[in-house]
Image: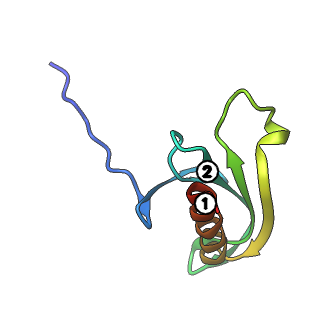
Amino acid sequence: MAEATTKEQLLYKGRPLLRCGNEIYYGNMTDKYIVHIVILSSKRVNDLDVPNQLSVQLMYTDPDIRLKDRIVKTSEKEGLYRALEIGTIWLERALSGK
């Protein structure tokens, strides 16, 4: 009999955070908006690749909207922390309707 496997999702400030290659998705796909972060470059620190230049986009999740028209805001940030913080601020404001 096959065993059921459960994966715990990585959360950041209560919202799902998913990395796929050089792309990071932040937020719930069932919400109206998500944050899409693309790692543009990384540097080597103690045998680890650390993202240092990132593109941040606030996007609609509606699949009926053309991809180009889904992008609401965009910015480039240095460092993952800064990218996540601006993405969190944008997402919270957009979901609250401000």
Q: Which residue is mark 1?
A: 91
Query: Residue shown at 80%/60% (left/top)?
Result: 74
- Mark 2 Cα-neighbour bin, 10 Å: few <14, some 14–19, many ≥20: many
Question: SS of the residue at dot 1?
Answer: helix
Q: Residue at x 61, y 64 (%)?
A: 93
**Callout 2: SS:** strand
Picture coordinates of residue 19, whole percent (x, y): 55, 52
The way the protein has been coloured in the rendering is: rainbow
**Distance CA(mark 2)–CA(mark 1):** 7 Å
Question: Callout 1 environment at 10 Å: few (<14), some (14 to 19), or many (20+)?
Answer: many
Find residue 47 and report its horizontal and vertical position in percent: 57, 74
Where is the C terminus found, in terms of image quarters? bottom right
Q: Position of residue 41 (x, y in %)?
A: 76, 66
The quarter of the rendered structure image containing the N terminus is top left
Q: Pointer 2 and pointer 1: residues touching (CB < 8 Å)?
A: yes
Residue 77: which numbered mark, if any? none
In the image: residue 53, left or right of residue 33: right
Amino acid, disc 2: Ile
Residue at horizontal 44%, vertical 67%?
Answer: 13
Number of marks in the rendered image: 2
Which residue is identified by label 2? 34
Q: Is residue 79 above or below residue 6?
A: below
Residue type, label 1: Leu
Residue 64 percent coordinates (x, y): 72, 26
User: Along the polypeptide, which appears first: circle 2 or circle 1?
Assistant: 2
**Depth check, front residue: 41 or 7:** 7
